[in-house]
Structure formats: C-alpha cells, structure tokens
Image: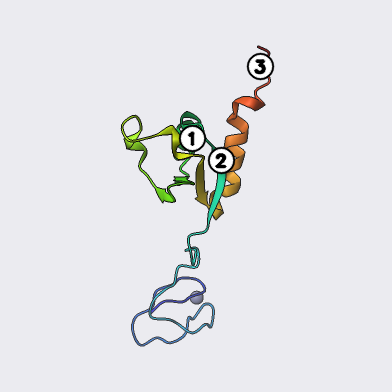
C-alpha cells in the first residue's frame, strides 16, 4: 500500500498514512506522467541539416524529440539520412514533449545561427 501524497510505502493492512492522514492506495499513479503525449513543434524547416543539428542539440541536452514530416505524416529515423531521405518531402517539424518545449526553444534560440552577433559577413 502507498500513500498518494508522500509516496510512503506501507505493509498490507494499513489503510491510512500516519504522516498525512490520507487514504492509502494499492498502486501509486505517477502524477508526472502526462495523460497524453502532447507534442509541441519547436522548429519547422525544409532544411534537413538544420533539423539534424537541432535534434542533436536537444538530445545532447537530454530532451527527447522527434522529427515529423508534414507530407508523409509519419515519423522517420534519422539513421536513414543520406539513404532514404528525399528533400521533396516538404517541411520537417521537430517536436518535443510539451513539458520540454520551453527548454527546447531556449536552447534553439540561443544557438540559432541567425541570432549570432558575430555574423557580419
Ligand atoms: Zn503520506
């Protein structure tokens, strides 16, 4: 048995948490788990190399992301770059989980080439 409030585990037979005075439950439901995977687009571009760079940046920061192609409406693995990728597929959307969206956008904005102040070419 578990306390849904503080997460303490109790042996079978206990019904209330001594600390919280809360009814115990048989299983803890992880409240942090999103009910549905809400994906947010953080980058949309037809430039596959830009997507690849952004994806590696996000993954390097521990942010899981997927690249979604508009026209095909499915997911594809980036391991296939150079073999099956066709630039005629249309814009690519790089998406992350809603909870990671802010961090992802900050990361991308801070590293985006067009925001570089050294760009005086
Ligand atoms: Zn408790």
Q: Is residue 13 above or below residue 119?
A: below
What residue is shown at x 55% (from left), y 54% (from top)?
99
Q: Which residue occupies the extreme top position in the image?
A: 121
Residues at circles 2 and 3 in contact by the CB criterion of under 8 Å = no
Cα distance, mark 1 to mark 3?
22 Å
Tag 1 residue: 51
Give whichever of 99, 82 is nearer the camera. 82
What residue is shown at x 60% (from left), y 29% (from top)?
112
Residues at circles 1 and 3 in contact by the CB criterion of under 8 Å = no
Tag 3 residue: 118
Q: Residues within 10 Å of mark 1 (few under 14, many from 20)?
A: some
Query: What kind of element bears circle 2?
Result: strand
Q: From the viewer's perspective, is the residue at label 2 or at label 3 nearer? A: 2
Q: How many marks?
A: 3
What residue is shown at x 54% (from left), y 78% (from top)?
20
Tag 2 residue: 43
Looking at the rendering, in which quadrant would you find the N terminus?
bottom left
Cα distance, mark 2 to mark 3?
23 Å
Give whichever of 13, 68 is nearer the camera. 68
118 with respect to 71 (left or right) = right
Give whichever of 105, 18 is nearer the camera. 105
């Amino acid at each position: 048995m578990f306390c849904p409030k503080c997460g303490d585990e109790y042996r079978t037979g206990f019904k209330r948490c001594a600390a919280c005075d809360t009814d115990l439950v048989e299983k803890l439901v992880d409240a942090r788990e999103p009910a549905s995977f809400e994906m947010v687009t953080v980058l949309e571009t037809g430039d596959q190399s830009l997507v690849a760079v952004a994806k590696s940046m996000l993954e390097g920061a521990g942010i899981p992301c997927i690249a979604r192609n508009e026209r095909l409406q499915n997911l594809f693995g980036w391991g296939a770059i150079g073999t099956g990728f066709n630039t005629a597929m249309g814009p690519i959307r790089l998406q992350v989980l809603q909870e990671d969206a802010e961090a992802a956008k900050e990361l991308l904005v801070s590293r985006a080439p067009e925001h570089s102040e050294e760009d005086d070419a």
